[in-house]
Image: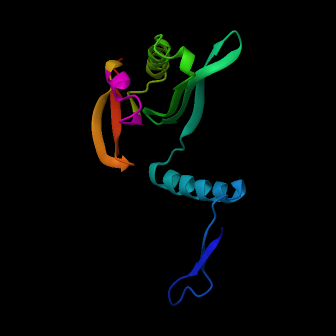
Amino acid sequence: MRATCREGAGMAKVQFQVEPHPAPQDEAVLRAGIVKFNVSCIHEQASHFCLFARDDGQLIGGASLWQHSDAFYIDVLWFEDNYRRQGLGSALLDRLDKQAVSAGIKKIFVDTFSFQARDFYEKNGFAVIACVPEYLLGHDRYFLKKSLSF
């Protein structure tokens, strides 16, 4: 389904299209545009990295992160069901803390939903800094921060 809408006087040639399955190269243009703008304001570009957990070579979980100047942002942290509640998530966060300190990182941010892992992050030293009530189907979204000391 592709919805097209023409908007406003003076914008007669601009069309807005809803695309349920956008082309990756089109999404890449959007991301590159906002990254370029952000770099012009903060004079640095975030870098992306992952911390993987493997069992006998098999990927069983890990984290996808971004580094911004003096902060890490945990975009995704996940483990397969049968590896949960065994301390692996906490061990991963401990490893991340050590990496952060050695890189001069002062804080780590993450967000999570009420049905996900708020308690887990709080048990690992994160504090809630904001909550958006009923963000998704009645579930709250929490933003957390962990300050690191050297």
Please tell me whether residue 125 is drawn above or below residue 137 in the rendered image.
above
On the rendered structure, is 70 left or right of 20?
Answer: left
Identify the residue shown where x is 34% and y is 27%.
146
Identify the residue shown where x is 52% and y is 51%.
39
Q: Quick one: 63 or 60, which is closer to the camera?
A: 60
**Residue numbers of the magenta segment:** 110-122
Please tell me whether residue 95 is drawn above or below residue 21 in the rendered image.
above
> In which quadrant will I find the N terminus?
bottom right
On the rendered structure, is 49 left or right of 43?
Answer: right
Q: Would you say residue 10 sits in the magenta stretch?
A: no
Q: Quick one: 150 or 82, which is closer to the camera?
A: 82
Q: Please provide percent x and percent y for residue 37.
A: 52, 57
Q: Quick one: 127 or 17, which is closer to the camera?
A: 17
Q: Please provide percent x and percent y for residue 45.
A: 54, 44
Q: Please provide percent x and percent y for residue 55.
A: 65, 11
Identify the residue shown where x is 64% and y is 64%.
19
Total residue callouts = 0
Please tell me whether residue 140 is drawn above or below residue 26 in the rendered image.
above
Q: Residue 20 sits in which quadrant?
A: bottom right
Q: Please provide percent x and percent y for residue 122.
A: 32, 24
